[in-house]
Image (spheres, helix red, strand yellow):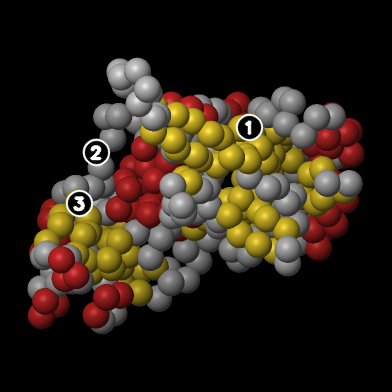
Amino acid sequence: MTFLSGKIALDVVAGAPNNGRGEDNVAKVKQMYVGRAVHPYVSAQAFRRWLRDSFPAAEPRSPVIRTGASSKQQAYTAGRPDLYLDDDLFGYMVALKKNAGTCQRDTVVANGTLVSVAPRKPSKDFGTMSRGFGAGENPVIHEHEFYTAELAADLLFDLPRVGVFEVDGSGLKVALTAAAAAEAEKAGAEPATLRGVRALKLPLAERRRRAALFVRALAGTRGGAKRSLHYGDRTPAFVLLAPMKGGVNPFTRVFGVENDKVVFRPDVLREEFEAWRDEIDGPITLGWAPGFLGKERDRAEIDLGELTASGALVFGHPRTVLRDLGDAFENGDHDAWFEDPDA
């Protein structure tokens, strides 16, 4: 049983990728305070939306059902992880009256909020709209915020649950309704046990495909707000994924701040690797885009040279190492990571 856990970072340059609630006719970016310091951020929900939108166009998405009106509205997906990749990986809750069709799936992909590592105060951009106005007419004034920052968040991918759906338990713990479970089994899903709970499991080839699709989508993540004015790269400039037997994330502190600049701490990675060596279930993937954090990449490549030489670490461009990881999934190189030892 293996989880991919680690860290991702985005390099936002003069961007406004996730907006908060506007104030006084100013469109504000999402931001938080740590003490008195301002840290812009991208919400976990927004990044999950970007990932969904980054799946191949031919991959079916779960349809959204909207019911009710006013304050009694509900919106939920089909709740069919056997049919839809996004229901499988991102989870859902379908809560209907009298429990008819009620089901729930906890997320397989867990991600934190992408927060600016170093404090960064957003700037304001002042604009006007006067096109087509008559002579002497006042323009319409508008303002919005944007910023430059390195954003980082933790990431967890629960591999044994990819393509495996609980059908036991009670209430909202069931991932598939009885009718949906019968359809899934008829289509080829097999009975299984997941962490002591009865479940249905998709064929291994499909589970491999879904894991590969996710890491490739991560490599090519696109999305974000204000693209007409602040278009920029939203693919991870940095991604670290470690196969961990227990699902902990010891590599959450690999970034630091020195003299107001974000730095990478190879000593933290090395010490955590030694401390958790018995729980690490294969090579760590480290993707780092050239130019991100200046010369920090070159220094890290030297400082982590022993781990790379021993095969404990795979170092390269994020797109290259993630696409290679996707190929390894599809080739069956990591089938053991999908297994549940309690089954």
Q: Amino acid at mark 1?
A: Val
Quickly name the residue at label 2. Answer: 60
Local packing at callout 2 (Cα closer than 10 Å; few below 14, some 14-19, many 20+) is few
Mark nearest the camera among 1 and 3 is 1
Question: Alpha-carbon distance for marks 3 and 2?
Answer: 12 Å
Looking at the image, residue 197 sits to the left or right of residue 330; the answer is: left
Q: Amino acid at mark 3?
A: Val
Pick the residue in front: 167 or 59: 59
Mark 2: which amino acid?
Pro
Asked if residue 294 shows in the view, the reply is yes
Q: CA distance from mark 2 to mark 1?
A: 33 Å
| Left or right of residue 231: residue 12 | right
What is the spatial separation of the Cα atoms under label 1 and label 3, in whole angstroms?
Answer: 34 Å
Residue found at x 41% / y 60%: 107
* Residue that numbered label 1 is attached to: 13
Residue 227: mark: none
Q: Position of residue 339 (x, y in %)?
A: 47, 58
**What is the number of callouts on the image?**
3
Residue pictured at 70% horizontal, 47% vertical: 120
Q: Earlier in the sequence, mark 2 or mark 1?
A: 1
Q: Could you tell me which residue is drawn at 11 percent across and 76 percent down?
A: 97
Residues at badges 3 and 2 in contact (C-beta under 8 Å)? no
Q: Is residue 208 visible?
A: no
- Mark earlier in primary sequence (1, 3): 1
Circle 1 crowding by C-alpha within 10 Å: few under 14, some 14–19, many from 20? some
Q: Name the residue that disc number 3 marks.
A: 64
